[in-house]
Each structure stands twice: as C-alpha cells, then as structure tokens.
Amino acid sequence: MDTEKVESKNFLEVKIENDLANGVNDGRVLTRFPPEPNGYLHIGHAKSICVNFGLAQKFGGKTNLRFDDTNPVKEDTEYVESIKKDIKWLGFEWEGEELYASDYFDQLYAMAVQLIEKGLAYVDDSTSEEIAAHKGSPTVPGKPTPNRSRSIEENLDLFARMKAGEFPDGAKVLRAKIDLSSPNMHLRDPLMYRILRAHHHRTGDDWVIYPMYDFAHGQSDSIEGITHSICTLEFENHRPLYDWFIEKLEIFPSKQTEFARLNLNYTVMSKRRLRQLVEEGHVNGWDDPRMPTISAFRRRGYSPASIRNFAQKVGVARRDNVIDMALLEFSVREDLNKVSSRVMGVLDPVKLVITNFPEGKEELLSIENNPEDPESGSREVPFSRELYIERGDFMEDPPKKFFRLGPGKNVRLKGAYILHCEDFSKDENGEISEIRCTYYEDSKSGSDTSGVKAKGTLHWVSIPHAVKVEVRNYDRLFSAEFPMADPEKDFKEFINPNSLEVLTEVYVEPALQSAKVGEHYQFMRKGYYCLDPDATENHLVFNRTVGLRDSWAKKHGKK
RNA sequence: UGACCCAUAGUGUAAUGGUAACACUACAGUUUUUGGUACUGUCAUUCAAGGUUCGAGUCCUUGUGGGUCAACCA
C-alpha cells in the first residue's frame, strides 16, 4: 500500500526534533517533572508526567524527578512519598535518585550574591504592601522604592545578615533589579528571597531565607542540565525572567516551553480545592475514589495503561481545553475490557427458584473468563435450584422489547440453561419476593439441543454458594459540568449528593472470595469492579471503577 | 487602557501554501449466550473582514472573543 499512516506529532515533539536536527545540546534530551510536595498528584499531573517522561523516552533521553520545595510552610515528606508512588505506579522511572530544589540552596545563595555583586539585585526593607504599591499595575509603570539605590556593599552585607537570621520574618527581601516599568509584571524587580522561619522538611532549620519559585526553578533546571523544561501555560509570562536569570548568571541555558494544562468537566483540579474537599470531609481522603487524584484513580480501579492512553488521546497543544470525562471513561473501559476476568455478581438480588431442578443438586458449570482473551481460560461456577438474579431483570408486565424475564417468557442464564418463567409471588409491600421458573434440561450452554429460543441472557448467583459482599458505586463528584463556572457560587454547592451508593446486600460467585487488591473484574452486564483496600477476608468490598455502556438504560431513560 | 498567548464538528487533537483527518460523544444500524465488545453509517468548509497567492485552516493586517500576568505561592 502506498498510503502509510503518518503519526501526527505534537508541537513539543516537533520542537525537540528540530533541536536534535540542529545539534542543540549535542542531541541530548533531559526533561524533568517538578512537583511541589504540598499535596497529592491529580490527573492533570498525570498528563504532565506522561508528556515529560514520554518525550524523553521517545527521543532517547531521561527525565529527572525534582521536588520544587522552596516553600517550607506548605510542604511535607508525606507528599513526597505519595508522589513517588504515583509516578512509579503510572509506569515511569526517573533518572537516578529523586532531586530537590532544596539541595541547591547553597548554590542558589551563591548565585544571588553574584547578582548583587553585578549590581543586579538589592535588599529591600519595604513591606509587601509598599512593594505592591510601587509595582504599579499592568497599565501603570512602577516606581522605585527608596532602597533600590543601595550600594553593592550594603546589599552584600544586608543579604548576609538576612541569611544569618538578624532580621525578623518579612522584614527584608532580596529583589532582582530589572525594569520597574516593564509591561511584563514579572520583570518589575521580582522577589528572589524572603525571610521565613519555618521548619523545612529536608533542611530543617538551617535556613531562614528561602528562594522564590522564579529564582529557584530555572537555575535548578540549569544546574541539572535540563534541556527542555516543559511546564504549563500559566508560566508563560515567567519565561523572560527565567531567561534573564540564566543569562545574567551565565549558566547552562535550559529552555522553557509551555503547554496547556488538562481540565476535566464534572470535577475540580486545583490542589487548593481538592484539599478543601478532603479537609472539610466532603470526601474520605485524597484517595477517595471520587477524587481526580492519581491515588484515587488507582483505588477506584483505573489501570496505569488506561491513564497513559488517556493522556495520549488528550494530546498536547497550547490552547485552553476541557476534556470530557467520557473520554477518560472510554479509556478505562477500553483497557479493562481486554484484561478483566468476567464474573457474576447480583447487586440488587431477588430470589429465583427452578422448580424442576432437583433439590440439593449442585452442578459445576464451566464459564469462560474473558471472551476477549482466549488465553484466559475458564472457571467453574456452581449452579443449583435456588438462585439470585437482578431485580431489574424481571418485570411483571414487561414492554415489548424487554429481552429479560417476565411471566411466560424465556431467558438464558449465562453459561447455564434456558428458563421459562412460570409465576412469581410478592411480599406485603408489593415487591417481587420470589420468581418461579422451569428449566429446559437439554438447553445447557455449549450443548444446547433444545431448539428453544431465548432473546436475553442474565447473570446469576447460586444462593447456597453465594458470597455476600459490599459494593460501592461511584458517580461523578459534581453534578455541574463546570463547578467553577459561576463566580457567584461556591463550587461546593455543586457537589453531587448521590456520588456514592453503598450496597451491602450484594451476592457474588464464590471465585471472588480470593479477589486481590489491584485486580480488575468485570461484573457481567454491570461494570468493572475492583477490591477496595478496606476489604477484609470476611467482609469484601468492591469499588465500581466504571459502569458498562448501557444502551438499553440510555434509551429508556433509566438510571 | 498594557504585555504575552490562544481561536478547526458538541469535546479534544491533526492537516510541507494544494480535496479539512482521527478519536470521544450523540444518533441510526449489523453481529452477539454480557442490551458489553466488535463492525458500518450520519454529524464542520476552519471566529470575522480585508490582503498576498494560480491556490489560504495555514502567511500578512485589522477587528472580535477567550486565557494569563499586579502572592514575601508554585
């Protein structure tokens, strides 16, 4: 064939390819993923991880993991550990040991001194209000504070004394001397260091001054020899400053390139708001399966591959975007469909008796584990006279195209026999309490000689063999597509009150007794489920990862 | 009223200046011992107006709309 499929490249790949072609950095590619350890990673970070590690993989490079820990008041080792775990779980390996911006505090300090010596930085005693006032606004140029003209000697002395702890928190800052009338606010003498007495998760109380993001990030990149420093669009206006420090310091020229961050509908993505949901108890922790964090997706049963595929499908560009949750759900179904064992579990049970099946008789039926994977083999499922089926699979007075059970109707039990519904009884509340059927003995799955037709197939569980478990069905956390859209309202007003449905009366086939955390199952006709870490041997708990597509329910407006 | 960035189906991402493609969603069908999966079909002339060109989604100009920036956060 003369038409080969050309894999389309995103702008970052094109850029790196050009760099490689032009011999930039001698063909070396080193990216980095630089989280601040102040919270758990979310699906947006997952995209960034896939982009950074993926780019390096594609071009024979490496990726550093560097914690951007320059603000001790927010950071903690708890987050460091969770972040490392999440990256590994996603299937990526960083180069060598993890790195920390705090490892460079000495070098950063020396760089600041260099800039002071060059007359490019000064100590300012102004309060933060005064500094803000002197900065002007985007349309009004700033004015110098009185300290801007201090001598190099005085600045050197003052900065050393800042470091030595001679001044109280907030009393002085070190600022770069750039351009107070720049149209780019970030160039109006940005802060480089502030005085902060807080315990740092790694350097303890060694320092009382800490570098700001802008003075730490680019130089950290440079120190590590990062070739492509890829970040999100909101840092775009920082780039001239990133370049300015590198140029004035005459250090390795890492280059920053920005891409659009991921947004998802029906959720919120900022760490601040996620933290609020956790701290105010709207969810049960950072890994509550309704959260958009990586740890939550893991607990909910998403596979690493499904998230990597999702990141791939989402693409990389420079325009703001909101990805449809449906794409994430598609990605996980697509992957789980291939790898999940099919099992039977009845979520809303109703008793069914096969009146012509001998009492006390038990039959073991062989049922394939996964029709999508012939290698997966089969398992034996016990069958008997009394079964549970799904309450919703029976209707007293079914509509025309209801392919399930109703008085006088035939239906196939998955992997078993065809039943004929004889009658049923109700309890005092008018609820169906028992369905009575007969079975066609010669209709056994795989050796059906009955000639009987059945339109539908139901899942079932043998009552004497059933294992009673708890099931947690999750729905989207927010009922509004854009919880942040209305500036008049708090996003928490849009929390979906029905985002968690706990079912305690669920019966599953005995094979599930040996289910393990991290395994994926498809509860046939229902959805993908996985064992929750809360489970104990005597009390199994299953999380719904995602439901199956259900064109019947969709068409009939049911839930 | 400043600087920078962005604008292609409902959503997202493509398209050396040469017939607008792919995926998701939605809808309609085929297959099916999961109303699942798989498969088929349907759905945009690229924000607007000018300009350059034989030819513009792509280049230029001007608008319009949106985003980011005035934290001792990252």
Image (cartoon, helix red, strand yellow):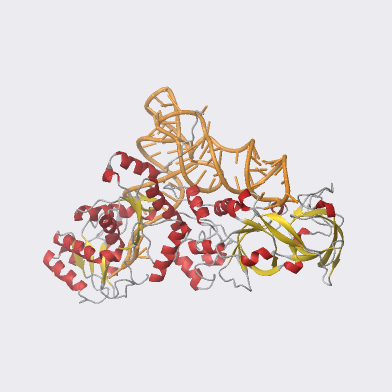
| Above/below status of A139 relative to A516 | above
Total numbered circles: 0
Apparent side of residue A170 relative to residue A354 in the rendered image (left or right) = left
Residue A111, horizontal then vertical, whole percent:
20, 61
Residue nearer the viewer, A259 or A174: A259
Residue nearer the viewer, A135 or A504: A504
Q: Residue at x 62, y 53 (%)?
A: A376
Apparent side of residue A378 relative to residue A203 in the rendered image (left or right) = right
Q: Quadrant of the C terminus of chain A?
A: bottom right
Residue A306, horizontal then vertical, whole percent:
53, 53
Residue nearer the viewer, A370 or A121: A370
Is residue A505 in view?
no
Apparent side of residue A96 relative to residue A420 in the rendered image (left or right) = left
Q: Residue at x 35, y 44 (%)?
A: A16
Residue A318, horizontal then vertical, whole percent:
41, 47
Residue A132, horizontal then vertical, whole percent:
29, 65
